Structures are given as structure tokens and as C-alpha cells.
Image: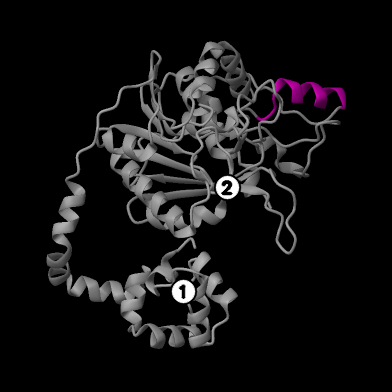
Amino acid sequence: MNNQKLFSVLNITDNKTLKEFAKRTNIRVPKLRYYNENSIFPHSEDLEKILEEADLSEIEFRIKMGVIDSNILDLISNNSKQISEIIQKDFNNEKEQSHSAFQPKFETKLGKLYQEDSLELIKSLPKQSVDLIFADPPFNLDKNYESKMNDKLSKEEYKKWTEEWILGCIDLLKEGGAFFLWNLPSWNTYSAEVLSKYLNFRHWIAVDIKYSLPIANRLYPAHYSLLYYVKGEKPNTFKQERIPLEICKKCGADIKDYGGYKNKLNPKGLSLPDVWKDVSPVRHKKYKTRDSNQLPVNLLERVISMSSKEGDTVFDPFGGSGTSYIVSEILNRNWIGGEIGPIDSIKERFKDIDFHREQIYKIQSKKNTLFTDEMRQIREKNEHWLPVDEEVDDKDKEEKNSSTQVDIFSIS
């Protein structure tokens, strides 16, 4: 039996002891499994039955389960001297462990790629040496990765592993540095709880990507979560990005009627919202370099361009197909990467770096403008409105933009 926190606390080691416990407490086996597998704290009558059978007080049970509310935290804080004296020795032993210095398996002009376990690599790197962290960890969905890693941990094991690598990454981040974490919303609810204790929350970015089919008795899972945090009060780098107006791809007409506000829209485009609809999954063999999911280039181009500058250091502990590394190289960022599995596909991508450079050039040519060249041609052909180019110098244009032009999102 794959024991998780609850069964471990209750000394339930197999189906026999589970059934015996269920019989003694009159709590059904499926319900006990539900509490255990989903890390749900038992409630009401079930809690009372469990405490009585296990001969535990509620506060002892909560501490063993790691479910500590504000009242218990206050009690711990008020008795911190006595508690610290009890655990100080074990705490020091854990902190004083030495960590190996690794050698990169692949290097470029700007980057170093290590073929190591992410936790060990994180512990080996200098503290406060990284400007931007982008992490796309395994989602614990029992997928077959090229690395043959275990992608089916228990919920408690996955949460503990996640907390460990996140805390390690926080130590690597410079003051003012940015931390982006890509995962399923269900997992990022736990990650956010860890991150919010040490970093400053900026955004929960919903990336509209429909990888999977609808699930019965559930809402259609249509977005991925991208958490954005910074270390300290404000980011060292944040470059406001703007996107084109949304139009019909066939006829060029406006998706929304903006009426008399059209001439007030900023010519550089609309402010980037925290819902990204222009990121598509990589499926075409021309762009896909491995069997597992691969992050789109425009996602990493946006994150890296928005939150770092040339010469900064980007760290991605879960290399995967190496998208963050190739984009960092092209955008003149130093980069450090880790991948426990094969790295041949990453090395091959760098041999074809000009292809990716052209991708990024096309991506950048279509942002920070209200209409791309392609959009203008469609709208001109179908006689839709376009802004009139005014002959004014840059200073006058900037003053006009700041005083009179608005973003689409402020128009009701």
C-alpha cells in the first residue's frame, strides 16, 4: 500500500489494517482512502472517531498531519524557545549537509546545461545568483518521460518534493528577481501557498491552452496556470508588453465594437492581460523535438523579455526540450539549466538555432503594435477602420498617448 500522511499517522500499512480501522471507527474504507489520497483533513464526526481510536488530541493530530491553522501557529510562536531547543540539532544537521559541484554536460557562449537531479543541482548553485527563474516541473500525471523518472508520486510526496525545490530556488534568486512557475492549477494552489510566504505575488496568469478532452462531471479544463512572483517589493525588470487588437482572421472585422473610442486606442497595442489566449500547444513536427509536451517558444519569449534584460541570468531546473535555454540564448541572456534525462534533443536544437531565431523574430514583429502588417492588409481590403498615421515627432506622440489614449480593457 502506498502510504500517505493520514495512513502513516494512523499506522495503516495494508488493506487488512485499513479494513480493521474502518470497522472500529465505522468510517467506510472508500472515505478513508479519499481522506488519505487527497490529503484532506477529516471533519466533524469522522475526526472525532479517528482521534478516539488513535488516542490523539486534535492539536497533536493536526501537527502530525501538517495541517496548522493560525491559532496553532500562534501557540508555536509563543512557545518557540522550547520547541526550537527540541528540534535544533536535527535542523542544524540538515542545513550543514555538503553538496557536490557538478560539471556541465553541454555549454554555449551564454549557457550551461547540467544533466543532474534538479534538487541536487539547485543546492549546488551560488545563493542570490539568478535574475529570473522559470520552472516547468513534471505534473505528476504518471507520464512516461525520457528520463524514466517517477511521475506518479503520492500527493503528499509530490507536495513535499515541490516545496523542497521551490525553497531552493528562492535562495538562488536575487533581490528583485522574478519567479515563474508553470503547472496545472490544482498543483499551483499548493505552490502558491509556499511561494507567498517568501516572495511577493504579482500575477496568476491563466494560459488558455486546451490540451485534453472534456472530463465528465467537471468543467472543461481549458487553461494552465503560470504563477508570477518577485523577490522583494518590486521587480528589477518589468517591460510592459502590448498585443494587437483582436480581429476576425478571415474578414478583419473587430471582434468587439469600440465605437467612438477607436481613435483613442494606443497605437502600440493593448496592455497584456493576465489571461493569455495566444499561446498554442506545440504539435507540428516542424517545431516539436520530443514525444513529451513541449513549451511554445512565444510563451518563453514573452516571460524572458518581460522580466529580464540582456546579460541577466535565467535558471530553469527542468530542461525538458530546452525551450527556455534556446530563447535565453537568442535574447542574449545567460542561462543555467538542468535535465535529469537525455539531453541530445536539446543539443540538436542549438544546432538549428537560426530556425528558432527566425521564430522569435516573427513573434516580436507581431507585438507592441495595434495592427500587424497582415492585419492591416486584411482590414484595408475589407474597408475596416485603421488609425491615421499623424506626422508628429516622437515626444509629441508619447505625450498624446499618455494623456488621451486608452486601453481596450478600460472600455465597458
Q: Nearer the viewer, residue 302 or 43?
A: 43
Q: Is residue 204 above or below residue 10?
A: above
Asked if residue 337 is among those painted magenta in the image, a careful observer would answer: no
How dense is the environment of label 1, judged by Cα within 10 Å: few (below 14), some, or many (20 and up)? some
Q: Secondary structure at mark 1?
A: loop
Tell me what residue is drawn at x 53 percent, y 11 percent. Answer: 351
The segment highlighted magenta reads 370-382
Left or right: 244, with 25 as reference point: right
Instruction: Single out the mark in the foreground, 2 or 1.
Output: 2
From the image, give the main secondary structure of the stretch colored magenta. helix
Q: Which residue is mark 2?
A: 142
Q: Nearer the viewer, residue 234 or 110?
A: 110
Q: Does residue 67 show up?
A: no
Q: Does residue 387 show up?
A: yes
Q: Secondary structure at mark 2?
A: loop
Tell me what residue is drawn at x 66 percent, y 41 percent. Answer: 277
Q: Which residue is mark 1?
A: 41
Label 2 to label 1: alpha-carbon separation: 25 Å
Q: Position of residue 179 (x, y in %)?
A: 41, 41
Left or right: 351, with 170 as reference point: right
Amino acid type at circle 1 is: Phe
Decide which of tag 2 and tag 1 comes sooner along the chain.
Answer: 1
